[in-house]
Amino acid sequence: MVNTSGTDIDVIQTGSEPRITILNGKDFMLRGIANANVLSVRRTDRTNAQVSVVSRWES
């Protein structure tokens, strides 16, 4: 997942902790994800402004 949102983001898998913080302009490879619907993304500062992220699937 590449964070080009302009702010730091938290990625949470299926509502569990711990969360993964991806800093603005950085990327992180998430392993073992079979379906993107198990992920949620939010701003680290928890404001209500929407963010967009970029990701791709590799096998």
Image (tube, rainbow, N blue to C red):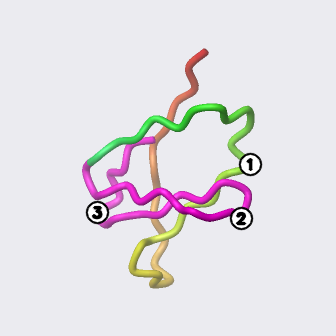
Image point (45%, 41%), residue name: 1
Task: Name the chief secondary structure element in magenta.
Answer: loop
Name the N-terminal-most of marks 1 and 3. Answer: 3
Identify residue type, mark 3: Gly
Please name the residue that numbered disc 1 is placed on: 37
User: Mark 3: few, some, or many residues within 10 Å (few <14, many ≥20)?
Assistant: few
Q: Residue furthest top?
A: 59
Residue 13 picture quarter: bottom right
Name the N-terminal-most of marks 2 and 1. Answer: 2
User: Mark 1: few, some, or many residues within 10 Å (few <14, many ≥20)?
Assistant: few
Identify residue type, mark 2: Gly
- Label 3 secondary element: loop
Provide residue 38's location: percent of width, then percent of height.
Answer: 73, 50
Figure check: 45 above or below 24: below
Report the front residue among 37 and 14: 14
Magenta region includes residue 3: yes
Magenta region includes residue 52: no
Numbered range of the magenta stretch:
1-25
- Label 2 secondary element: loop
